[in-house]
Every structure is written in C-alpha cells, then in structure tokens.
Image (cartoon, rainbow, N blue to C red):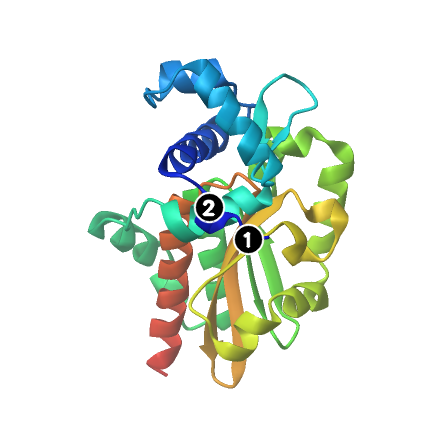
C-alpha cells in the first residue's frame, strides 16, 4: 500500500524533523528531543504515537544502539521528493568552483579529475566522475572515513570495493546515462546490493562528444541532499559548458 498520501500534516512535520536531525547528527532520534529541539508543537506522548505509525508505514526504524528511531531509505525518498529545502549555490560559490578548474579544460582527463576533487572538497563527501568508455576517477575517500557510518568495517569494505567497478556504476545509472536525466538520487534498493542499502548518492549526467558521463557525490544515506544537489548540478553544468564550446 502506498502510504505517502495517507500521512497527515502532523506526521509529515514529525518525519521532516526526524530526517533533519538524523542528517545533521547521524544519531537516533527520540520524541523528547523532537519536542524540545524542533518545537513541533506536540507532546512527547503524541509524537511517540505518531512515530509508531511512521514505523508501521516503513518510514522509520528502531536503532540498534538506543531507544530512538532512524529514518529509512523510504523516508529519505519522501523527504527528497516533497520536503527538500532548496539552497542554490551563491554566485561566489559558483565562481570559486569554476576558477579552480577552468585552467585545466584543454586536458580532458585532468579537467575531470580536478572537478571531481573540487566537488569532493566543497561537499566533504566522496566525488566520482566516469564516462561510458571506462574512464573513472574518484576523490575524497578521506571524507568518507571521517563519517561515523564508515567506521563499520564491513560497510566501508563493501563501498570501497565497488568504487573501482566502472561497469557496476554504469549499470546502476543506466537510466541516467541513456536518457540524460538532469539528476539521479540513489537510495536503498537502487544499488541492487544489500550491503550498500545504507548508502546515498547524487549524480548528474553530461556528454563529451559521443560519450555520456556522470558526476556525483557518494556518502551515507543521510547525505546532506539540499547542499549536494546544487553542487552536483553545477559541476555537471561546468563540464557541459567546457565541451559544448568545442
């Protein structure tokens, strides 16, 4: 059953607060914290009751480490599709990114490597760029290792083990690559690997001559999407601007 249309305004408000807090801290969220920090306007008892409903609908789950709840990939998808705050890059941010890569445009490989490195540094996440011809480059592994989810050895091993598999990423992003969708956000089962379901990523497509490519950010499921989306979109736009001129 599709419960999205069945969520009340109160449930949506509580769910947004849970997702916002989890993106910010990575910690499980309890009813008292929501009442005190987010001033949602409901008592902890009311919030707890609504969290039970959200849990039954598959939007939040119990944490292994506390009595709080954590949002599921389904919650993040709902948040992204309906609640995501729009934070466009400032002109200063756009100029800063362009200035760091513009001098490398005559060397295609170096240009793509530099723009991925800048994207990683600006976001504090791992950035990846690849072409269908098998070119792949990523930067920012140190950023992932500083995020608490990646202290889990098995999870980190699964993620890093897939980074060099270009065919895997091209396959996962086949829809983006073939239809030039402006943006693709991957969550949960999108990865087609159980061990990667706690991963989140944002990719945007571009074209260099007859080669399709994609650039994006990879992080935990609680990736800061409102900041990641404009960054990824803009870096893809820069690549298009450079190679459209040629």
Which residue is rendered at x = 65% and y = 42% of the image? 198
Q: Residue at x 47, y 34 (%)?
A: 19
Determine whether, in the image, residue 217 is placed left or right of residue 165: left
- Residue 136 at x, y percent in the picture: 62, 64
Are the residues at dot 1 and dot 2 in contact (C-beta closer than 8 Å)? yes
**Vertically, is 246 above or below 187?**
below
Q: Is residue 135 above or below residue 17?
A: below
Q: Say which element carries label 2.
A: helix
Residue at (22% x, 48% y) in the render: 92
Q: Quadrant of residue 190?
A: bottom right
Residue under numbered circle 2: 6
How would you rate the neighbour count of disc 2 (Cα within 10 Å): few for under 14, some for 14-19, many for 20 or more?
few
At a point 61% along the width and 43% down the height, the residue shown is: 141
For residue 2, the mark is: 1
What percent of the width, then of the height, locates residue 178? Answer: 55, 79
Q: Badge 1 local density, few (<14 within 10 Å), some, or many (20+)? A: few
Tell me the CA gap for discs 1 and 2.
8 Å
In the foreground, 6 or 181: 6
The local secondary structure at tag 1 comes to loop
Quadrant of the frame with the C terminus:
bottom left
Q: Position of residue 124 (x, y in %)?
A: 48, 39
In the image, residue 194 lies at what x, y percent?
A: 75, 48
Whether residue 140 is visible, yes or no, is: no
Q: Is residue 210 above or below residue 21?
A: below
């Amino acid at each position: 059953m599709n419960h999205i249309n069945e969520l009340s305004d109160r449930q949506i408000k509580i769910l947004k607060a849970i997702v916002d807090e989890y993106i910010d801290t990575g910690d499980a969220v309890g009813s008292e914290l929501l009442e005190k920090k987010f001033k949602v306007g409901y008592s902890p008892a009311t919030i707890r009751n609504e969290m039970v409903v959200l849990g039954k609908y598959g939007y939040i789950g119990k944490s292994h480490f506390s009595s709080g709840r954590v949002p599921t990939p389904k919650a993040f998808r709902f948040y992204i599709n309906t609640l995501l705050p729009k934070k466009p890059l400032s002109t200063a941010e756009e100029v800063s990114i362009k200035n760091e890569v513009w001098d490398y445009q005559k060397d295609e490989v170096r240009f793509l490597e530099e723009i991925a490195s800048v994207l990683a540094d600006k976001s504090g996440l791992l950035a990846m760029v690849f072409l269908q011809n098998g070119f792949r480059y990523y930067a920012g592994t140190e950023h992932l290792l500083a995020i608490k989810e990646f202290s889990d050895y098995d999870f980190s091993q699964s993620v890093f083990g897939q980074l060099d598999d270009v065919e895997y990423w091209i396959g996962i992003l086949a829809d983006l690559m073939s239809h030039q969708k402006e943006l693709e956000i991957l969550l949960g089962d999108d990865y087609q690997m159980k061990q990667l379901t706690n991963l989140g990523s944002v990719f945007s497509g571009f074209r260099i001559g007859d080669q399709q490519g994609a650039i994006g950010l990879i992080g935990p499921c609680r990736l800061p999407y409102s900041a990641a989306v404009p960054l990824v979109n803009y870096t893809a736009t820069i690549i298009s601007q450079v190679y459209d001129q040629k």
